[in-house]
Amino acid sequence: MNWWWLFALAAVLLLGIYLSMTAGRLDRLHLRIESAERALDAQLALRTAITIDLAVSGLVDPVLGAVLTDAAHTARRSAEAGVRDREIAESDLSRTLSLAFQDPEDVSEIQRDPEGAIFLEELAAACKRVELSRRFLNDAVRACRQVRSLRMARWFHLAGHTSWPQTVEMDDTPPPLLSAS
Amino acid sequence: MRVGLVCPYSWDVPGGVAVHIRDLAESLIRQGHQVSVLAPFDGEGVLPDYVVDGGRPVAVAYNGSVARLNFGWKATRRIRKWIQEGDFDVLHVHEPLSPSLSVLACWVAQGPIVATWHSSMARSRALSAVFYLAQISMEKVSARIAVSEEARRTLVAHIGGDAVLIANGVTVANFADPSALPGYPRSGGTLGFLGRLDEPRKGFDVLARAVPAIVSRFPDLRVLVAGPGDSEDALSDVPVEFHKHFVFLGRVSDDDKVRMLHSIDAYIAPNTGGESFGIVLLEAMASGAPVIASDLLAFRRVLDEGRCGRMFLTGDPQALADLACDLLADPDARSSMSTTGHERARHFDWERVGREVVAVYESVVLPGVRVREDLRGQIMGRLARSKPIDVSDS
């Protein structure tokens, strides 16, 4: 009776199961990151669109309209540029929005118009969803990195050729006055 | 949006989580979404039309109390069928750490999944294996919600990662009807308690031991007790001459619960642990009943550190008796507490909470992506594969 062979066989089998499970986890996590990225893209695009809508609606003064359009424009263009540029442009848009709606008087002036109230509500909701989407994306990235740094995952190259997942770092604070409502 | 909600606990035994899911479902329906809830069901009573029977649960001991859960081949099959037929935009599971329909749903589904954490737990050796498995199944979940800071801390400490804090809600309008039980409100002092009598963490025992001291100042005191459990057992430590002060209503309907809350001078929440939020406090406050609660962290938050209710050292009957006597003797304090409590409850109204939950859904759903079955790497799942149902073509 040669027990050692059996032990070795069992060990190899267990290792195989473990590796296959871990590869499955990584696969799911990469998929989740991908979906989260798409969701964030969609929410950012929506925020940009609403900002432009509001800027050209005639409800804000021409100076603010120009500033908002410019910020939204840069943010939209940056989607094709590098990741870093995009983070900066989207952060700029967040800050521009916060600046644009920092005065309670301005906000209530726009809200007086029924159309304006709807715009602001949509904008607040979009900003909130950008914040959530980014949070969920970064959470997925964190979970993925954790599995990818497991020793077994590194030794056996379970992640294949996929690049090291990156979090999205930007200022996504919704305009404080709008999110309060 | 088509939303699939998974309730881990039996629908016909209304506990905190089941009530949360019912209110969430109704709030979503009011907002115009299509909602289907999959819930364990014992077959008592009738299910609302948005609830799908998830099978009969089995009683097992889990995490320090008796839980009634579903598991196994049949349950898995039901979930697969429900997911196939539901064609959901988002799947929302609750309490994904308890071994229940929620875990099974996470396990057999892929696509946009949201999970809500309700309870807080202390770390234990036995549970760490569960946490390891949970961590793996949680990797599918796109967005996580915690109903309280305690629940969130449990999640962050045990599983890692992040969660959005969306406090539990109360449908304030449901508690507005001011009619009371026949014969109430009465003079002489009336206290109220809601909760299972046989669940030690609900703390009925603490209240029962406080009653003799309160009776010494309020000889006409009455304590309304609503909730399932054996009243004889519950009073076994109380001297017989005090038994007449307790009125046991048994398990009450929702309407009777509201009437009961409108019949009392103060609501007592003597819980000794295991509460992560304290929705029952909000219900009492929404009815305008002043609240006296133990100083659990969760209760302190709901009561805004004592601004909206009075608190005593958890598990201390004498401290409870003192507070109850003070409050029963002071009608002005009661009415001002009633007002601040009601305002506080409005802050947690489901209208607001429901919109926050929808914002989470919207930030994870993708056009064209639906919740689908996930058969990868699951032997049990493959065995339990139900007949495919064609929903895509018409």
Image: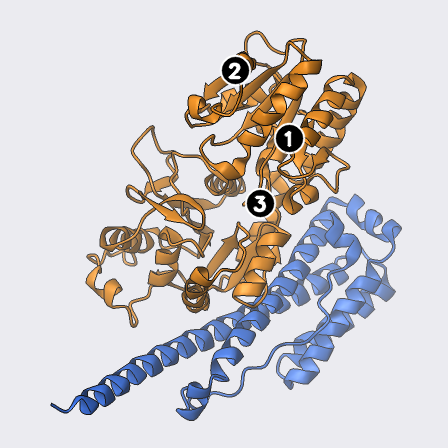
Chain colours: A blue, B orange
> What's the CA distance linking mark 3 and mark 1?
37 Å
Dot 3 corresponds to which residue? B354
Looking at the image, tell me whether mark 3 or mark 1 is earlier in sequence order.
1
Mark 2 vs 1: CB contact within 8 A:
no
Dot 2 corresponds to which residue? B243
Numbered disc 3: what chain?
Answer: B
Looking at the image, tell me whether mark 2 or mark 1 is earlier in sequence order.
2
Q: Amino acid at mark 3?
A: Gly
The answer to whether residue A100 is left or right of residue B298 is right
Numbered disc 1: what chain?
Answer: B
Taking depth in this image into account, of B102 and B143 the one nearest to the observer is B102
Mark 3 vs 1: CB contact within 8 A:
no
Secondary element at image label 3? helix
- Res B232 quadrant in image: top left
Dot 1 corresponds to which residue? B317
Secondary element at image label 2? helix
> What's the CA distance linking mark 2 and mark 3?
43 Å
Q: How many marks?
A: 3
Rendered position, B93 above or below B196? below
The answer to whether residue A105 is left or right of residue A157 is right
Residue A110 point in image, percent of width and height: 80, 50
Taking depth in this image into account, of A93 and B167 the one nearest to the observer is B167
Residue B288 point in image, percent of width and height: 68, 25
Residue B103 point in image, percent of width and height: 38, 57
Rendered position, B327 above or below B3? above
Residue at left 62%, top 19%? B212
Which quadrant: the N terminus of chain A? Answer: bottom left
